[in-house]
Image (cartoon, rainbow, N blue to C red):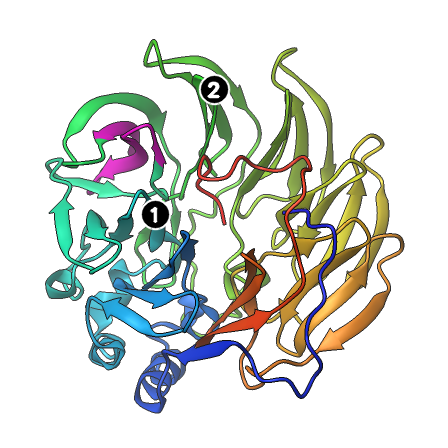
């Protein structure tokens, strides 16, 4: 989001609040799963739980344990289980076979929190399904669990006008299905086939299904499959208006080893992302090595260029497209040339950034970096209060900067107000 200015407090100022969700027992269990190779290829230690925010609370999905935090006080309002209970699952091999950190998603709309997760009682089942569960935002009371036969949910739920749009696949089947569900009940209204995905293999020998991304604009829904296709779906006709296909390589080999090096895109939990400015769409898929600019009205590629697999689009302004990995890169929107790049101590997931007209802000393992958008120079570093974390996601809400790391959620007071700029429509996209 583009904000006119952002000023964080002095280094010795206490945060507005901080909530630690990772204790020593759970931290040791995650470390054990890495050293005994059960979960090494998943990079659990760098996982940052996804966040959804409304006017009163922030909501999180930590491996299926959902919890809510009061935005003003930092008080834990509710949680679906104790965080320490996850420790036992990290020592169970069946959990690692089914667990895919990218598939734990969360969203909120009209006091209804939607989460994709494996229920606690099924976490250690072989090839457990990811369910879609609805909770009441104020209390955490479970409202319903979507019952679509043998479907396992893949994407972050997108809510609009009392409808939920979410992509699923039948367990042990690679066919992707776009579903429209009723927000109040979770019952299916209609569905649309999106074809069959080409899945890769994990270090546990299990299939890794792609995690699609949804974005709504008017009567159309864009579905970035993260598997070589971008669908433009007409909601009134419940049909595919157009599909753009492009080369996408998937590693289907069985040569994974527990001791193999963890790729940077896995370490950073890089996601596919899509930003739209009128008819121009800029996107990069998870695991892909190209970024695209696509004209939807003319249905042609404006440009594409190579980029590292770990890079994720995190912002868009009138001049640049910004991608973050272990460096922040600014690509010119017209020429697609690299205007500048700066190395940053990014060491965890939750890839995101805040943007003012002159600066970019990134939450890293060394604190919050303020970066010049003119040339990429580092202007300031705010160390903050989460000094032992690996960094993670950053978001601004009502003048409060919320930083989510691999171990805590911290809120800092700031002087900032929203401003208009080309950006994804709020509450109408299923990206971070």
Chain part drawn in magenta: 159-181
Calculate the distance from the C-alpha at mark 1 to the C-alpha at mark 2. 20 Å
Toward which corner of the image does residue 119 lie, by quadrant?
Answer: bottom left
Characterize the magenta stretch by its predominant secondary structure.
Answer: strand
Q: Is residue 13 magenta?
A: no
In this view, the residue in front, 209 or 140, is: 140
- Labelled disc at residue 108: 1
Residue 252 in the figure: left or right of residue 93? right
Q: Is residue 171 magenta?
A: yes
Which residue is rendered at x = 53% and y = 68% of the image?
Answer: 403
Which residue is rendered at x = 34% and y = 47% of the image?
Answer: 108
Toward which corner of the image does residue 238 lie, by quadrant?
Answer: top left
| Residue identifier under label 2 | 218
- Seen from this angle, which residue lies furthest right? 375
Which residue is rendered at x = 66% and y = 46% of the image?
Answer: 315
Does dot 2 land on a helix, a strand or a loop? Answer: loop
In this view, the residue in front, 18 or 56, is: 56
Q: In the image, residue 175 lies at what x, y percent?
A: 29, 31
């Amino acid at each position: 989001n583009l904000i006119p200015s952002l000023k964080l407090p002095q280094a010795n100022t206490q945060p507005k609040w901080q909530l630690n969700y990772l204790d020593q027992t759970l931290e040791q269990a995650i470390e054990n799963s890495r050293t005994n190779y059960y979960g090494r290829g998943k990079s659990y230690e760098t996982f940052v739980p996804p966040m959804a925010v409304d006017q009163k609370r922030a909501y999180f999905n930590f491996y299926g344990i959902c919890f809510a935090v009061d935005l003003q006080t930092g008080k834990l309002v509710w949680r679906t289980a104790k965080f320490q209970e996850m420790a036992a699952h990290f020592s169970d091999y069946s959990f690692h076979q089914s667990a895919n950190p990218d598939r734990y998603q969360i969203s909120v709309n009209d006091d209804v929190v939607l989460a994709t997760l494996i229920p606690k009682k099924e976490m250690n089942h072989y090839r457990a399904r990811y369910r879609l569960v609805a909770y009441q935002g104020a209390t955490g009371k479970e409202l319903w669990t979507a019952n679509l036969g043998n479907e396992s949910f893949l994407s972050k739920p997108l809510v609009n006008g009392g409808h939920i749009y979410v992509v699923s696949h039948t367990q042990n089947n690679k066919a992707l299905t776009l579903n429209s569900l009723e927000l109040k009940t979770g019952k299916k209204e209609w569905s649309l086939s999106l074809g069959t995905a080409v899945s890769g293999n994990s270090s546990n020998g299990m299939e890794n299904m792609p995690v699609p991304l949804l974005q709504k604009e008017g009567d159309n829904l864009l579905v970035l499959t993260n598997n070589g296709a971008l669908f433009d779906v007409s909601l009134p006709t419940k049909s595919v208006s157009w599909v753009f296909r492009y080369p996408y390589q998937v590693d289907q080999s069985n040569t994974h080893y527990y001791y193999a090096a963890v790729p940077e895109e896995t370490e950073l939990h890089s996601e596919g992302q899509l930003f739209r400015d009128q008819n121009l769409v800029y996107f990069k898929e998870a695991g892909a090595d190209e970024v695209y600019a696509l004209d939807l009205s003319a249905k042609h590629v404006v440009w594409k260029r190579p980029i590292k697999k770990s890079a994720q689009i995190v912002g868009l302004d009138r001049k640049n497209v910004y991608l973050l990995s272990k460096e922040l890169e600014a690509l010119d929107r017209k020429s697609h040339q690299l205007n500048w790049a700066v190395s940053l101590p990014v060491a965890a997931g939750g890839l995101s950034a805040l943007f003012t007209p002159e600066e970019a802000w990134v939450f890293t393992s060394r604190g919050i970096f303020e970066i010049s958008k003119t040339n990429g120079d580092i202007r300031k570093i705010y160390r903050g209060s989460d000094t032992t974390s690996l960094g993670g996601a950053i978001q601004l809400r009502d003048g409060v900067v919320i930083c989510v790391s691999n171990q805590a959620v911290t809120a800092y007071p700031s002087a900032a107000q929203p401003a208009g700029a080309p950006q994804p429509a709020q509450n109408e996209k299923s990206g971070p």
